[in-house]
Every structure is written in structure tokens, then in C-alpha cells.
Amino acid sequence: MKKIILLLIGCLFFAVSAQAVIYTSDNTYQVDEILYDKKTNMPITGEVRGIVNLNDNSMTVELPYKDGVLEGLAKTYYENGNLKAELPYKDGVLEGLAKTYYENGNLAGEESYKNGKCEELAKTYYENGSLQAEANCSQGKAVSGYLYDWEGNRTKMTNAHLHNLNKEINSFQ
């Protein structure tokens, strides 16, 4: 996810609310994952905002920066303005509880990150809010877990389930 956010920065129009400066890919540059202002050659500090168009869908992003590095709670929003994801960063790395949401605003999933890797418990939910799956994570991988049907009945995850879940987890890391 860190790589995706950094890629988005390079191709978007941005506004840093704290400094009231508008950034584009023409007046920012990145060196060793640090985002700089070309005019001042200083690392960007403040909230960077932009609109991303992916697969004919637009999404608004709010990215908190401190000294050119992601620091704080990054947020993405659906085209309708509802929150899509909250991703906590510390020193440019995912750190803390990341949450994703359905377009209707209901919680879709939550994963705990430490040093950029999924740790402890990860959960996904059905759109109605019922628990869909929970997995124990260690060193960035789901190692065990359970699936739940609409009625709350629980089934142990197979290796195939864990493999597919690890593909999703790796997309955020």
C-alpha cells in the first residue's frame, strides 16, 4: 500500500492545507521515499490532498506528511464522499489499526500493523456488519483463522483460504 500511495503522489494534483500551496507532479519530487517541494527543496509537512482516478472510479486521498514522510492517519474516500480506508503511518510505515469501509459506511475490515506488517488479529465483515472472517497474523502473514457464514457459524480456514488472505494482506504492506 505504501508503494501505491507514493505512486499516486507522483501523478496527482495536491494541496497542502497547512501551507495553502498547490502541488503537482511538476513541482514535487521524491528522493528515497521523501517527498520534496521543488520550489523550496524542503520536505513537505502537512496534509496532502488529491483525487485519484482508478478503473473509471475517482477517490479522494488525504495523506499526512511530516518532513516528507507519511506520518499519521492517511484516509481515502469513495466518490460519494464516504470514508473508504484509514491507514495509520509512523515514519512512512504502516503502524497501528488499519480499517477499510464499504461504500455504505459500514466497516469492511480491520488489520493491526507493526513495522509495516500485519500482526495479531485481522477481521473482515459482511456489508451488513456481521463478522465474515478473522485471522491471526504473525510477521505479516495470516497463520490461522476462521470463516463465518451469515448466521455466525464458524469454520476453520484451510491453507487455500490463508493463501488467498495473505495475497490481500500483502497488497497493503
Image: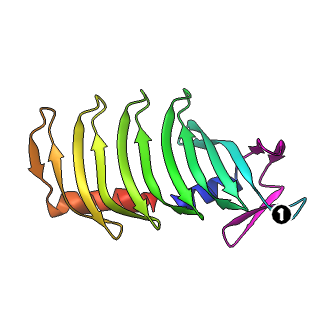
Task: Specify the segment rendered in magenta.
Answer: 12-36
Q: Depth check: 9 or 148 in front?
A: 148
Image coordinates of residue 50 in percent, x first then y, are 68, 42
In the displayed structure, would residue 51 be above or below residue 63?
Answer: above
Q: Quadrant of residue 32?
A: bottom right
Q: Is residue 73 left or right of residue 48?
A: left
Is residue 87 found inside the magenta-colored segment of the image?
no
Count up the numbered dots: 1
The residue at 35%/39% (across/down) is 108
The residue at 24%/59% (across/down) is 136
Q: Is residue 61 left or right of residue 45?
A: left
Under mark 1, the amino acid is: Met
- Circle 1 is placed at which residue position? 42
Q: Is residue 100 left or right of residue 150?
A: right
Image coordinates of residue 98 in percent, x first then y, are 44, 50
Image coordinates of residue 59 in percent, x first then y, are 58, 38
| Residue reaching furthest to the right | 39
| Residue reaching furthest to the bottom | 32
Q: Residues within 10 Å of mark 1 (few under 14, many from 20)?
A: some
In the displayed structure, would residue 44 be above or below residue 22?
Answer: below
The residue at 50%/50% (across/down) is 87
Image coordinates of residue 100 in percent, x first then y, are 42, 42
In the displayed structure, would residue 43 be above or below residue 146?
Answer: below
The residue at 61%/43% (across/down) is 61
SS at mark 1 in the image = strand
